[in-house]
Image (tube, rainbow, N blue to C red):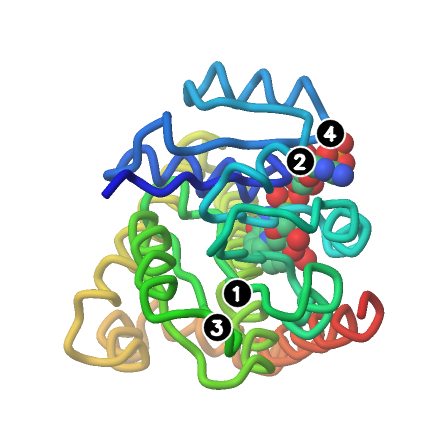
Amino acid sequence: MTAPTIGFIGAGNMATSLIGGMLQQSFKPGQILASDRNAEQLDKLSRQFGIQTSTDNDQLARDCDVLVLAVKPQIMQAVCRALPSQRKPGQLVISIAAGIACRSLAEWLGADTAIIRCMPNTPSLRGQGVSGLFASAAVSAEQKQLTEKIMNAVGISLWLDQEEQIDAVTAVSGSGPAYFFYLMEAMTNAGEQLGLPRDIAERLTLFTALGAADMAVHSDVDTAELRRRVCSPNGTTEQAINSFSRDDLPGMVARAMQAAAARSAELSKEFA
Ligand SMILES: NC(=O)C1=CN([C@@H]2O[C@H](COP(=O)(O)OP(=O)(O)OC[C@H]3O[C@@H](n4cnc5c(N)ncnc54)[C@H](OP(=O)(O)O)[C@@H]3O)[C@@H](O)[C@H]2O)C=CC1
Ligand SMILES: O=C(O)[C@@H]1CCC=N1
């Protein structure tokens, strides 16, 4: 069987992370294509990855076995409606857009289109992504397997039973890298304020984040227990955790994530 061709419509941040991650695994440059309205962005991608690029979305829609829709939610309807109705037979469409429902995609692309909604994240570029997947009724078992193959090449993937759960996945892991980057920025700044050179404060922060995440992923105890093991009684960490607790860090995180999930649900209505 020949390798399936995978075409990305929209070749921005998230598509770049996915393509870069796929090429580090079993995918070959010859089976990945990307189209974008921005020729400069395409040039960058073809130089970086050696993949075929085009400013013609229609060509990808006609030629590719899998079409990954990676444009902003705001323009998804216009992009979908402009695609040719005669696309490659048996084609699978994977949308990675936040808040665009399968129902809307089916209305714009044709009711019998096999559609998977996927919420990935940018660490896919390093093979450390995590994605939530939801398949519409028209998707076959083979198409689900192929989607797993793509997404597992860049990290891990988890199937969801209900499409609405994608809003929560977006709030946890789709947007999640930004929360950790924000915390890393804050820790680096605070380390500098405590008297460290910036580059040392930054490296201490980044390697602490990496070490903590790796430890948590491979641990047989939960993160609350790992946290307790760092807190010596009446020691330094306890002072920091008490300060976070007084400032209601858990509440702040919950409110931020509720806002992200609410925006995802709102996008579904705004761009239906
Ligand atoms: N970034 C992230 O961490 C994540 C993003 N997503 C989803 O991925 C999607 C893309 O996000 P992201 O990569 O960040 O966005 P980007 O803006 O970086 O990428 C989108 C690309 O699509 C291009 N584009 C615009 N119009 C067209 C068109 N008509 N045909 C082809 N290409 C077009 C844009 O060009 P131009 O710049 O000229 O407009 C841009 O290069 C969004 O729907 C988002 O919700 C999902 C998970 C995580
Ligand atoms: O901010 C956004 O809307 C997109 C979806 C998840 C991450 N980035």
Pick the front one: 112 or 213: 112
Q: Amino acid at mark 2?
A: Asn
- Which residue is rendered at x = 54% and y = 48% of the image? 68
Q: Amino acid at mark 3?
A: Ala
Q: Amino acid at mark 1?
A: Ala
* Crowd band around label 4 with a 10 angstrom C-alpha radius: few (<14), some (14–19), many (20+): some
Q: Earlier in the sequence, mark 2 or mark 4?
A: 4
Left/right placement of residue 69 relative to residue 100 reads left
The answer to whether marks 3 and 2 mark residues whose Cβ atoms lie closer than 8 Å is no
* Alpha carbon separation for disc pair 4 and 3: 28 Å
Pick the front one: 246 or 257: 257
Mark 1 residue CB less than 8 A from any atom of ligand 1: no
Tell me which corner region of the image, top left, top right, bottom left or bottom right, holds residue 203: top left
Q: Earlier in the sequence, mark 4 or mark 3?
A: 4
Q: Position of residue 69 (x, y in %)?
A: 60, 50
The answer to whether marks 4 and 1 mark residues whose Cβ atoms lie closer than 8 Å is no
Q: Which residue is mark 1?
A: 114
Is label 3 in a helix, a strand or a loop? strand
* Alpha carbon separation for disc pair 1 and 2: 18 Å
Q: Is residue 96 above or below residue 231?
A: above
Q: Earlier in the sequence, mark 1 or mark 2?
A: 2
Tell me which corner region of the image, top left, top right, bottom left or bottom right, holds residue 257: bottom right
Is label 4 in a helix, a strand or a loop? loop
- Which residue is rendered at x = 61% and y = 24% of the image? 54
Pick the front one: 117 or 170: 117
Is label 2 in a helix, a strand or a loop? helix
Q: Amino acid at mark 4?
A: Arg
Mark 2 residue CB less than 8 A from any atom of ligand 1: yes
Residue 37 numbered mark, or none? 4
Q: Which residue is mark 3?
A: 135
Q: Which residue is mark 2?
A: 57
